[in-house]
Amino acid sequence: MWRISLQRQRQPSNAFETTIRILFFSSCLPRFEAKLLQLCMAEKHPLDTDGDPLSESLKYRKTDGKESVGVSLQSDNASATSEPHDSTESLEKASTSKDKKDRNRGRRKRDPEQWKSRGGGWGPKEGSSDAPKEPRLPKRECALMIGFCGSAYRGMQFQKVLPDLPEPPTIEGVLFRALVAAGAVSNDNANDPVKVGLSRAARTDAGVHAVGNIVSLKMIMQVPGVDDMLAHINSKLPSDIRLWGFQRVQNSFDARLFCDARKYIYFFPSYLLIPPKPGSGLYRVLKEHASLQGHDSVPWDNDPFWTGIDPSTSTPQEDLLRKRAWRATPAQVERLREVIKKFEKTHNFHNFTVARDPKDKTNQRNMKKLEIAEPAVYGETEWIAVLLDGQSFLLHQVRKMIFMLVILCRTQTPSSVLDEMFGLSSYHIPKMPALGLLLDHPLYTAYNTRLAKLNLDPSHQNYREPIEFEKYSKEMNAFREKHIYDDMRSIEDRKGLFDGWIRSVDSYKGNDFLYLNPQGIVPPEAIVTKGERRALPFREKKVFNATSFADNDHEKVQAEAEDEYEEETEGQLTKKQLEETEG
């Protein structure tokens, strides 16, 4: 083992010296050691004010049969010794070490009341030495398949709040407390989901539903005295959150990172495809813009739905009754399918989210497969479902995509305008109502393929089941109809939410939607420039983010009412915030 001693004297001081000892566990070159020490000394003790340079001398000697090197850094006129250590210094160090031990020993024996006086949770917890601890049960990395109706919750993700504030209701918060109550999470880990490594496949916004989602964490799979752990956990959950099943996964599993794709469904009344009402703000703005471009009319002018009545005297209630009896034509459904295909493959979706730099590479998202289901009539209203299968989605991406799908079809704007939306210029794209959105389920194709390649027998201790929702399809479909679709259709029947939303769009009189024209040409007036205030920006109402209303609330949503508006935000989110908003 190398021993390096360093001594430095300087003039005019008589006896100024510093000793540094460095123990190396492997041999190294003397020149490297000397240079290292020279740098250390230059940092701690600069050159004398008279500029006298430091000189080096290396001396090798044998001590106790082991090779060592002595290094002395000093002024040219100063003397050097290879061993500046003496017995007096050793005694002083030993005494100091003993005093330090005594002080430390005193701290360890500090009275608990003294710890309390320091505040901040210092010291041992009360009763920690005498209170009996619960038996430690083995924890295993597990994937939990869940479904929920999100109407009563502030989103999927657990939210930390200050101690004095109430915790907002979230899906993860309710699920985690149920796991603690069921014994699947020990009391030692009951105060923070991070302790058990909780992760989710897809984050959902406030009010958004999920028929299937994955939560991964380390949990106790079997509690003594409990025969059916699945039923036991479900008994601790409310009826609008269900645990379909749970299974052990590989230790490295992470619900978000291992997820290959997410499947979403957006459900909307087909009457949204009816063109803007004659005389409305959007009708006049788009028709005026068309005339400035040399066109006397727009393709959707004189639509059969609006003929035979006086639009200036018909009330919203009368219009809604007629809208609910309206049915989409096969040509209109095919038009939806043609437009939705433009979103497939990889594009820059910065216009379909919020607070994103257009040049940020993370805006690139891959939409694998997008489909339009056949329209279906429920009650008096015809509904259309859009099925979206994508690798991952940005915040509000699905709702903004469906807005462009609907608005392009109802104004007969060419789908080529979407190429401009995928470019670097910014445009204002509103969101569809949150009511129609639900997460169908996430996919784990790569993880399942890796398990299949291992080809382990189910009896093998390392065997893990593939993550699939098909085995729960019966229960999931029943939950979807009872807790999601029925609730969604009931709100629309009572409140006319989608009709209120489309009337709020049609009442807009500004330039934000001038990209809607039969030529598919985006005028400069429709481009949003950061930092510049628009003359009349479109403002979205908060009511269209709601998915829950009182059962006795039958008042229709009024598009013309001065409700609360959302705030327009130009500030960009941090990288961590952006990751947390993805789903």
Image (cartoon, rainbow, N blue to C red):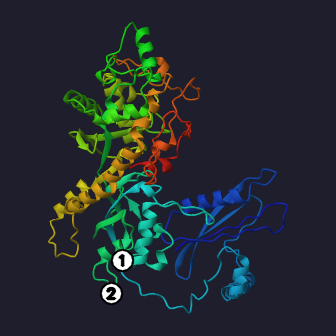
SS category of the residue bearing label 1: loop
Task: Give the percent coordinates (x, y) of residue 53.
Answer: 73, 53
Q: Residue at x 84, y 64 (%)?
A: 13
Residue that numbered label 2 is attached to = 225
Q: Is residue 95 above or below residue 467?
A: below
SS category of the residue bearing label 2: loop
Between 218 and 316, the one lying in front of the other is: 316
Task: Give the percent coordinates (x, y) of residue 537.
Answer: 54, 28
Q: Residue at x 40, y 43 (%)?
A: 394
Residue that numbered label 1 is attached to = 220
Q: Quadrant of residue 571?
A: top right
In the image: residue 583, left or right of residue 535 = left
Between 453 and 127, the one lying in front of the other is: 127
Task: Give the percent coordinates (x, y) of residue 299.
Answer: 31, 16
> Badge 1, how many Cα within 10 Å: few under 14, some, many 20+?
many
Q: Are marks 1 and 2 in contact (CB under 8 Å)?
A: no
Q: Quadrant of residue 121?
A: bottom right
Q: Residue at x 31, y 83 (%)?
A: 226
Residue 90 seen: no
Between 241 and 497, the one lying in front of the other is: 497
Instruction: Name the residue type under label 2.
Output: Gly
> Farthest top residue?
294
In the image: residue 525, left or right of residue 274 = right
Instruction: Name the residue type under label 1.
Output: Ile
The label number, if any, that marks residue 238 in the structure image: none
Task: Give the percent coordinates (x, y) of residue 316.
Answer: 43, 32
Q: Residue at x 61, y 63 (%)?
A: 165
Q: Could you tell which of marks 1 and 2 lies nearer the N-terminus?
A: 1
